């Protein structure tokens, strides 16, 4: 995509033509895959502006191309609904959650999300809503910090993030699963065209008289992708690399966000406890797999060295 002289990324006719061609190809492919959306123009606008603005912004956006690729893959999942490939777990997952983590309330066994929904309060709604809003800004903010502080650690974190997501996507297609709110609103019958739902997070929107979470969940790629909870995976990756990079007190913040997101996932009826545990396991396996590949794969090491030279 670029011409590299030393550590400097230069603009030339070839790089301009490639960036323009890829931008147009993305719009055309997206139109046929998932339909036109203004989000696509926003993404291209950010990429192109930063690519051409300066050497520093160009290196920055080239580094974050890893996350852009992840976002595109996630978005394109809409074109291939996982329920077309395997049966969706609805009643079986609900039953397993109730069997393992069920809470007895006056002789009735409730799942943890059902129990917490009955005991929701405005203060907990507000706190948990803010925690759940951290699931993307915190990883991206941490990635930006690493980009300017330690390019190699930035690449480690970014590739681990994508690898964990890919592992999660494999499970999504192997084991499609309905979230707790689906059972609450639709019972145990399968309705393939079900739209995303804010569930308990609607209380946060109502509390502040906004439609923030509603706008987020209207854009979800797949309702039946509750297992594993990648919301629960992301803060684990951040906390791991925060500890690895010895960030001190900031890791306390990362730890609080991690636990807060785990709790909110269940409290807001977006995930079962089993989904959260699966998300933690997915993050752990992704981190371990990346570290193993880093030790054993010369191709990965060479790729990292080349990529680091481009963004340094």
Image (cartoon, grey):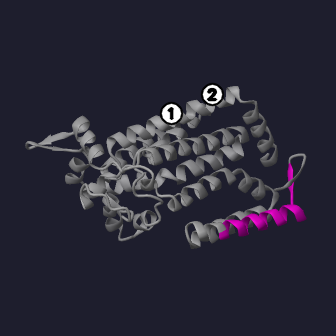
- Disc 1 is placed on an element classified as helix
Quarter of the image with the N terminus is bottom right
Viewer-closest of 310 and 228: 228
- Residue 35 lies in quadrant: bottom right
Res 249 visible: no
| Residue 302 magenta | no
* Residue for point 52% across, 38% down: 239
118 left or right of 168 in image: left
Asked if residue 26 is positioned above or below residue 269 in the image, the reply reads: below
**How would you classify the magenta stretch by its main secondary structure?**
helix
- The range drawn in magenta is 8-28
- Residue 34 lies in quadrant: bottom right
* Residue for point 54% across, 39% down: 237
Measured in 3D between alpha carbons, the distance from the residue under mark 1 to the one under mark 2, in whole angstroms, is: 12 Å
Question: What residue does disc 2 label?
Answer: 292
Residue 99 horizontal/vertical position (percent): 22, 37
Residue 4 horizontal/vertical position (percent): 88, 50
Residue 176 horizontal/vertical position (percent): 40, 49
The numbered mark, 1 or 2, whose residue comes first in the sequence reads 1
* Residue for point 71% across, 40% down: 150
Question: What residue does disc 1 label?
Answer: 284
* Residue for point 23% across, 41% down: 98
| Residue 18 magenta | yes
- Disc 2 is placed on an element classified as helix
């Amino acid at each position: 995509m670029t011409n590299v002289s030393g550590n400097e990324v230069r603009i030339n006719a070839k790089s301009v033509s490639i960036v323009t061609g890829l931008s147009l190809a993305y719009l055309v492919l997206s139109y046929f895959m998932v339909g036109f959306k203004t989000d696509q123009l926003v993404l291209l606008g950010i990429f192109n502006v930063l690519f051409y603005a300066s050497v520093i912004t160009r290196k920055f956006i080239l580094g974050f191309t890893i996350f852009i690729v992840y976002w595109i893959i996630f978005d394109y999942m809409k074109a291939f609904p996982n329920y077309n490939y395997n049966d969706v777990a609805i009643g079986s997952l609900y039953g397993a959650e109730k069997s393992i983590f069920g809470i007895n309330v006056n002789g009735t066994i409730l799942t943890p999300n059902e129990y917490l929904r009955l005991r929701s309060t405005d203060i907990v709604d507000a706190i948990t809503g803010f925690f759940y809003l951290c699931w993307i800004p915190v990883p991206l903010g941490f990635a930006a910090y690493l980009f300017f502080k330690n390019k190699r650690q930035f690449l480690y974190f970014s590739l681990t993030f994508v690898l964990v997501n890919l592992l999660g996507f494999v499970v999504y297609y192997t084991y499609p699963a309905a979230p707790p709110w689906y059972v609450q609103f639709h019972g145990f019958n399968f309705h393939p065209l079900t739209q995303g739902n804010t569930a308990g997070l609607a209380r946060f929107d109502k509390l502040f008289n906004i439609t923030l979470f509603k706008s987020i969940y209207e854009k979800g790629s797949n309702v039946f992708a509750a297992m594993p909870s990648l919301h629960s995976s992301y803060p684990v990756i951040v906390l791991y690399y925060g500890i690895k990079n010895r960030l001190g007190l900031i890791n306390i913040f990362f730890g609080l966000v991690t636990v807060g997101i785990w709790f909110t996932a269940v409290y807001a009826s977006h995930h079962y406890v089993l989904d959260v545990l699966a998300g933690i396991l997915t993050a752990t396996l992704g981190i371990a797999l990346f570290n193993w590949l880093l030790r054993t794969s010369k191709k990965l090491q060479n790729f990292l060295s080349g990529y680091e030279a481009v963004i340094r």
